[in-house]
Image: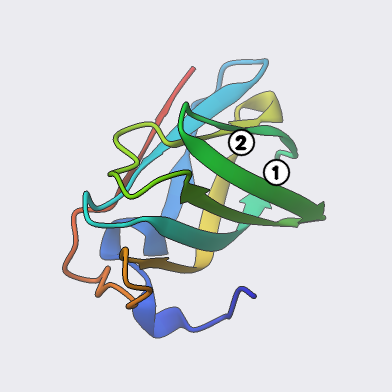
Amino acid sequence: MLTATVGVLVALLAGLVGCGSNAGACEANVRIPAEARSCEFLFEDTGAGVQDVAFGGGIVGEWIRQAPRTAVAFHADGDSSMGDNAVAVRLMDGGGYVVIASRCFDSESRELDIDSANMEVGCHD
């Protein structure tokens, strides 16, 4: 289950992430620490609905939306790094979102200290 523990948020994820002002959809890619084998996060969109969440090759995941929040959980289908662009969140109307909670786990199910990890979100139209 996702938790709303704000203390584990990454500084880059804690603020509002904008996806541009162009009409149409915007895709935000999540890059996670190399040692992560599974992650989960909860975010709230601001002015745009989630159209879809796509998982990269070798990634198994699920997402559920209860407006305006979306929960996403995913894991590698083997003991290997999930790599860049493991998850892509597609927002409608070029909106943005705020991450409320996030956490990742290594191959031995230990929670990673993602405050100090290199976890980034980028968005492009």
What x and y, as percent, mark residue 14? 39, 64
What x and y, as percent, mark residue 98? 53, 57
Q: Would residue 15 be seen by someone viewing this image from the given angle? A: no
- Colouring style: rainbow
**41 and 110: which is toward the camera:** 110
Q: Secondary structure at mark 1?
A: loop
Mark seen at residue 95: 2
What amino acid is found at the position of numbered circle 2 in the picture? Gly
At label 2, counting other C-alpha atoms closer than 10 Å, the crowd grade (few under 14, some 14-19, many 20 or more) is: many
- Reply above or below: 78 against 73: above
109 lies left or right of 56: left
Q: Secondary structure at mark 2?
A: loop
What amino acid is found at the position of numbered circle 1 in the picture? Gly
The residue sitting at the front extreme is 78
Mark seen at residue 60: none
- Reply above or below: 123 against 6: above
62 lies left or right of 111: right
What x and y, as percent, mark residue 78? 40, 45
Can you tell which quarter of the image residue 66 is in? bottom right
Q: Locate the N terminus by quadrant.
A: bottom right
- The residue at 61%/46% (across/down) is 61
Confirm or deny contact between disc 1 and disc 2 (CB under 8 A).
Answer: yes
51 lies left or right of 102: right
- Reply above or below: 71 against 87: below
Can you tell which quarter of the image residue 23 is in? top right
- N-terminal of the pair, mark 1 or mark 2, is 1
Mark seen at residue 47: 1
